[in-house]
Image (spheres, helix red, strand yellow):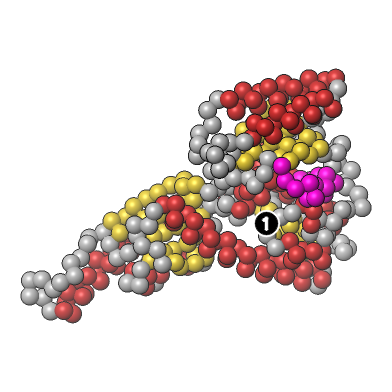
Amino acid sequence: MAMATPLRDELDRLAGFAPSTCPVLSLYLDMRPDQNGRRNHATFLRKVFLERSRSLHGEARKSFDRDARRIWEYLEAEVPAAVQGLALFACSSADDFFEAFQLAASFEQHWLFLGSVPHLYPLARLSDQYPAYAALLADTNSARLFVFRLGRRDAHKRVTGVKTRRSVVGGWSQARYQRHCENFHLHHMKEVVAVLDRVVHAEAIGHIVVAADDTARPFLMERLPKHLAEKVVDILHLPINTPEHTVLAETLDALRQRDAETDAERVAAMIDACAAGRLAVVGPEATLDALAMGQVEELLIATRPDALRRPRTLPADSPPGPIEVDTTAPQATIDTDRIKLAGELVARAQQNAARVRFIEDSARLEEVGGVGAILRFRIEGQT
């Protein structure tokens, strides 16, 4: 599952960045227009770029100023209206490092992080909030299959069968006509399932949301093989001609409701397993140790860094220096030590090829310090 997560390759590459002695900029911008139809990121950037530049000296300031200019140049080029969120990473003194990601999903505020490595927590959280999944709308003679990833459509396929007439024709008996219709429906659903199977395999899809009318639903569900049926998270009632934006909104909502249920189950299982000395650890210190040993299969972390408990110490090989933060978010939520910890946990999980699961209800992790992990293996004598 971890390898199929959106932005997996990009996050892996960023997590492998070697610490720099000059500031690395991690910039997250909410590119949604305001009530006047205008984007407002420029006001934020003018203020923070000027203030941060003045606080730096020597080569660090030169590197920062070069990065700020390059970011302005990038933003002055046309950024399509469809872009709702923008993530940029830059450090000119590190081989002119620059990465930009235009996203259809938005960040809730503007954020600028300065540290010795890229800060990945917001990008990893967005990837978890907008997973890759398939949405299948079907009736007895047509189907529409979408693949959504990061809040936008990545693929769309149509399957059209033979449309049967509602009236009995040619003197057929009702029973014979019914069998005739059912044969067409069966053939259509076999074709739909075959297309779904190919797409799910090719796109490494872990979740499917189905929408089918009362007639089509039994024909479809009875023919789904086990490996596809196990991926179905919900069955909705959406007409076959539902607009794409409504399909995205309804299916994503269903997926998140299911995810909330799964979060609760996963957290409870982790805490129980840890208490029983099985394949789990909880708390920042134990989780960091397990990440250092390559034991972590799945990291469970609160969606708010301020929900994390500060560890007594960070690992000796942690990126040096503090992290500096500027944001339009309420200042009460800013704790740079916890923000650095959140970034460290996510980066190490990426380096471990571990799944990162953000727990929306942070209270579920409160008793264990906001973080824990499901392990691949235990080490003898580990507590």
Q: Nearer the viewer, residue 246 or 272?
A: 246
From what the image shows, is residue 107 above or below residue 242?
A: above
Callout 1 environment at 10 Å: few (<14), some (14 to 19), or many (20+)? Answer: many
Quarter of the image holding residue 15?
top right
Q: Quarter of the image holding residue 138?
A: bottom left
Q: Compared with residue 17, is residue 252 higher up or lower down, i.e. above or below?
A: below
Which image quarter holds the C terminus? bottom right
Looking at the picture, tell me which residue is in the foreground, 123 or 53: 53
Which secondary structure, mark 1? strand
Going by the numbered disc 1, the residue's amino acid type is Arg
* Dominant secondary structure of the residues highlighted in magenta in the image: helix
Comparing 333 with 43, the one in front is 43
Q: Position of residue 351 (x, y in %)?
A: 72, 45
In x, y percent, where is residue 20? 80, 30
216 or 257, nearer to the observer: 257
Give the residue at x 62% y 68%. Answer: 261
Residue hosting label 1: 357
Inspect the magenta stretch and tell me whether residue 218 lies in it. Answer: no
Count of numbered circles in the view = 1
**First to last magenta residue range:** 328-345
x 68%, y 22%: residue: 69
Left or right: where does residue 158 sit relative to residue 224? left
Q: Name the quadrant containing residue 238.
A: bottom left
Q: Residue visible at 74% across and 54% down?
A: 304
Q: Residue at x 79, y 29 (%)?
A: 51
Left or right side of 289 for 161: left
- Residue 299 horizontal/vertical position (percent): 72, 56
Q: Which residue is outermost to the right?
A: 312
Residue 340 included in the magenta stretch of the image: yes
